[in-house]
Image (cartoon, grey):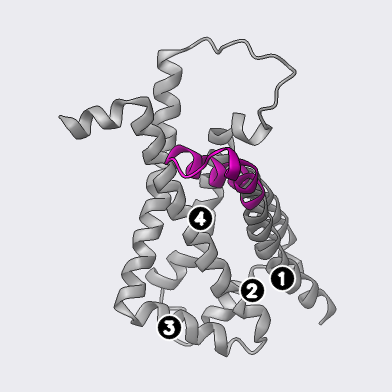
Amino acid sequence: MVMDSFFRLSVGKKIIMSLSGLFLIIFLLVHLSINFLTVLDSSGDLFNKAAEFMESNPVIFVTRFVLAAGFLFHILYGTWLTIDNKKLRPVPYAVSSKTNISWSSQNMWITGFIIFGFLILHLYNYFYKFTFTNLIESGQITKFDLVTGLFHYSNWPYTLIYLVWFIILGLHLNHALYSAFQTIGLSNQKWLVRLKYASGIYAIIITVGFSTISLYFFIKSFLE
């Protein structure tokens, strides 16, 4: 009963969304760190070894799925909350055109839905092929080749979609980190501005980081 009430309370919903959102924040940092190895070592050995270590180390292997599960829960729970709120308030409140509320904070579900849509494509291109095909085991292709190959200039539509997706993700994250800390009570007037800057910097790092990797291999394939 207590947990059920907590899930239904407005404050409880916000805390759950904030904590699950932190899974997304951590997951993306880890993901970016590993992917950046593809740029540091053009042979792919460094990335392949890191990927193998991630899969062979039981602690990291389980942690990766815990973070991914938290990421997925955040998206699904956010979708449920949005639908539930629309049922309770079918007619939206009138909002003044002069507001300090950012576009990203007003459209978190829209950006989240777009992120989820591309995530399905992303999981198919990487996780599905890593896990449910024999491309890697048969030696037909390495994980490095699979990760970087989609950014070949001949496959420019995918690269373009990928870049747009990370811009949208950046907008989502720009509000997410600040909002998460604020909701769980880790912000005050002294830290308010600092958290806003930290959230913006984090969003830029993720957006620019992943975009740089894709553009690097896109341009490299064009010059070769």
At x 55%, y 43%, the residue is 176
Q: Please give the residue where the numbered disc 2 appears in the rendered image.
A: 149
Element assignment for label 3: helix
Q: Which amino acid does label 3 sit on?
A: Glu
Front tag of 1 and 3? 3
Q: Please give the residue where the numbered disc 1 appears in the rendered image.
A: 152
Q: Is residue 129 visible?
A: yes
Asked if the magenta segment contains residue 192, the reply would be yes
Lower position in the chain sequence, tag 4 or tag 1: 4
Which of the labelled discs sits on residue 52, or is there none?
Answer: 3
Distance of label 1 from label 3 (alpha carbons): 24 Å
10 Å crowding of disc 2: few (<14), some (14-19), many (20+): some
Q: What stretch is highlighted in magenta?
A: 173-198
Lower position in the chain sequence, tag 3 or tag 4: 4
Q: Report the front residue among 61 and 3.
A: 3
Distance of label 4 from label 1 (alpha carbons): 28 Å
Q: Please give the residue where the numbered disc 4 appears in the rendered image.
A: 25
